[in-house]
Image: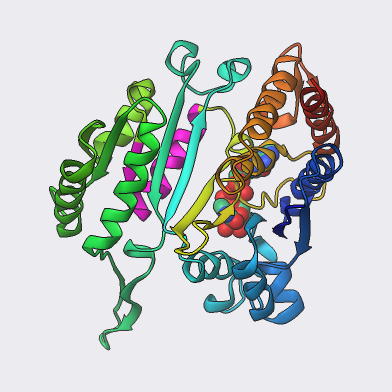
Amino acid sequence: MTTRKLLLLPGDGIGPEAMTEVEKLVALLNAERGAGFEIERGLVGGSAYDAHGEAISDSDMARAMAADAVLFGAVGGPKWDSVPYEKRPEAGLLRLRKDMALFANLRPAICYPALAEASSLKRELVDGLDILIVRELTGGVYFGEPKEIVDLGNGQKRGIDTQVYDTYEIERIAKVAFELARTRRGKVTSMEKRNVMKSGVLWNQVVTETHAKGFTDVTLDHMLADAGGMQLVRAPKQFDVIVTDNLFGDMLSDIAAMLTGSLGMLPSASLGSPDEASGQRRAMYEPVHGSAPDIAGRGIANPIAMIASFAMMLRYSFALVEEADKLEAAIAEVLESGTRTGDIMAPGCREVGTTEMGDAVAAAFRRKLAA
Ligand code: NAD
């Protein structure tokens, strides 16, 4: 029987609450489909700092490297605001991304028809929206050196971050975007700031060359990232796949998030290069939202972003396409039935907590697996 090694890193705040709902689905797949998932659990973020004095221990990092896929919850919270910078909760997430070389972050923004009213935009602008933001994740200004605060000695300090991209980093993320576009509507929009940034000039050139070399069947557009932000809220359905750098991708995907109604709905995947021997990509899946300290521990968090992240894992890491489709259909069915957590509540719907939402999705998923 196939064995699939899965590392769960629930993290802080609502991370563990939402992750519990995925464990029910893993158990279901093992029981009903003999899926062979073997679960390990580790610590990351503030919970790891409390236990080991680090945002992720070396042993948990080694388990992440050895796993077939990692499911990550969320990290951070006011409790750890004053820990040393290099040990802050986010350092665990950044180390996972860096050491696993997860350079491609996939963030779908799908507007379920049942939730179109929850968007801050008009229904006709978002109903049926299905876009994918492909964000470069291991380069750019979050990692570039020098990165420091320098004392200028005259009562002034200087904060420095460095935006830097090499050709190969741009080429490999562009390839991921073009390949994904082929499985969708065949259109890529590349966003940068070539009007004011040298890294933007290079980004534009390399994406254009990569397209010309092997992807001319895909339509390529270029847009300045600020104009792209504007277009995302003016007419989001014009986009299919958006490819952009680490910083712009961070912001643009949060804008896309609000188009779909709630952060509690948004999954993501982070992929590395395929392993030469097995062809398997290192991969980590995580909801876009943070640890939501304002609602943590109250049993009201929406677990759908986490569950949908697990669905992406079934699709991209384990090629369990039918199961992924059925899980996504189960989420849509539960929303259609009017079952809602507080963040996506609407008049006439029934408000439930995290556990009840997870149970409703699991029940719908079980019915679909059996059909
Ligand atoms: P957040 O995503 O945690 O919360 C923003 C708002 O959305 C809050 O009002 C929250 O209650 C709500 N929300 C988020 N997820 C929800 C869900 N599943 N169900 C219902 N409501 C939900 O962002 P923030 O408040 O800016 O950050 C809180 C902490 O999380 C900070 O410490 C931040 O650094 C950290 N953070 C972590 C990650 C991550 O681990 N990937 C991402 C973003 C923020």
What x and y, as percent, mark residue 269? 53, 48
Determine whether, in the image, residue 73 is placed left or right of residue 218: right
Q: Is residue 258 above or below residue 248?
A: above
**Which part of the image, by quadrant, shows the C terminus?**
top right
The outermost residue toward the front is 1
The outermost residue toward the bottom is 153
Q: In which quarter of the image is residue 268?
A: top right
Determine whether, in the image, residue 107 is placed left or right of residue 249: right
Q: In which quarter of the image is residue 188?
A: top left
Determine whether, in the image, residue 191 is placed left or right of residue 6: left
- 275 or 155, nearer to the observer: 275
The magenta stretch spans which residues?
Answer: 242-259
What x and y, as percent, mark residue 31? 87, 42
Q: How is the image coloured?
A: rainbow
**Residue depicted at x 73% and y 56%:** 3
Q: In this view, does 209 lie above or below 70?
A: above
**Residue depicted at x 56% and y 17%:** 116
What x and y, as percent, mark residue 307? 69, 39
- 73 or 342, nearer to the observer: 73
Q: In this view, does 160 lie above or below 252?
A: below
What x and y, as percent, mark residue 148? 35, 78
Residue 254 visible in the snapshot? yes
**Residue depicted at x 33% and y 35%:** 229
Q: Is residue 97 above or below residue 364?
A: below
Q: Is the magenta stretch mostly helix, strand or loop?
A: helix
Residue 81 visible in the snapshot? no
- 262 or 104, nearer to the observer: 104
